[in-house]
């Protein structure tokens, strides 16, 4: 196969950022860069910083920038956690985790701590990985990072 059509090299533009954070993998699990999985956190912090800067310059735009950051956080977090939950369900064959739960910011962190962490421990045992999963408090505070780094061990 040759280079992609359209003259854009593979990995260019937004697709390159997604490929860098979510590279290939095996057995239904993609390898991810755990720091790229922190993109939802960067989105909400960036929105808050920009809204505070613009609060002094143009107060009417400040709220809009914070809202954009909040929406970006919800969308990125939901997409990322839902995709990782589907991969984990594929490894374990357990359909216990509902995909819609990963789209609700507060509930998704609690679900990651209560349901995803034990399922990840079981997936690691099924694959014969001796090292324990990240602690469950990490699934509550930074669910994207903990989930992505534990899934990398399964890939």
Image: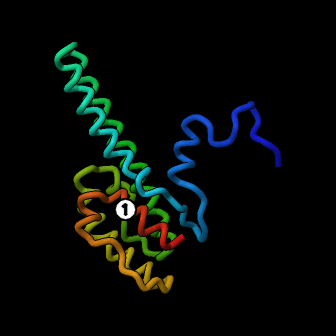
Say if 141 sits above or below 46 in the image. Answer: below
* Residue 109 place in picture, x, y as percent: 26, 58
Q: Residue at x 33, y 71 (%)?
A: 134
**Picture quarter with the C terminus:** bottom right
- Viewer-side residue, 40 vs 82: 40
- Viewer-side residue, 70 vs 142: 142
Q: Assess disc 1: are there few (<14), some (14-19) or many (≥20) residues with their C-alpha within 10 Å of its C-alpha.
A: few
Residue 81 figure quarter: bottom left
Say if 44 sits above or below 153 in the image. Answer: above
Q: Residue at x 57, y 48 (%)?
A: 19
How many labels were placed on the picture?
A: 1
Residue 144 figure quarter: bottom left
Quickly name the residue at label 1. 98
In the shown orientation, is residue 40 left or right of residue 50? Answer: right
Say if 142 sits above or below 19 in the image. Answer: below
* Residue 67 place in picture, x, y as percent: 26, 30
- Viewer-side residue, 115 vs 54: 54
Q: Residue at x 53, y 46 (%)?
A: 18
Outermost residue toward the top in this view: 58
């Amino acid at each position: 196969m040759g280079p992609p059509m359209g003259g854009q090299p593979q990995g260019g533009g937004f697709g390159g950022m997604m490929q860098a954070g979510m590279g290939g993998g095996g057995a239904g699990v993609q390898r991810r860069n755990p720091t790229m999985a922190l993109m939802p956190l960067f989105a909400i912090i960036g929105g808050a910083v920009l809204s505070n800067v613009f609060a002094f310059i143009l107060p009417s735009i400040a709220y809009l920038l914070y809202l954009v950051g909040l929406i970006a956080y919800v969308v990125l977090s939901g997409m990322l956690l839902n995709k990782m939950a589907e991969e984990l369900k594929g490894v374990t064959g357990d359909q216990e985790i509902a995909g819609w739960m990963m789209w609700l910011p507060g509930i998704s962190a609690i679900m990651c701590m209560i349901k995803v962490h034990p399922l990840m421990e079981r997936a690691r045992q099924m694959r014969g990985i001796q090292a324990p999963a990240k602690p469950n408090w990490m699934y509550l505070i930074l669910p994207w990072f903990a989930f992505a780094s534990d899934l990398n061990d399964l890939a």
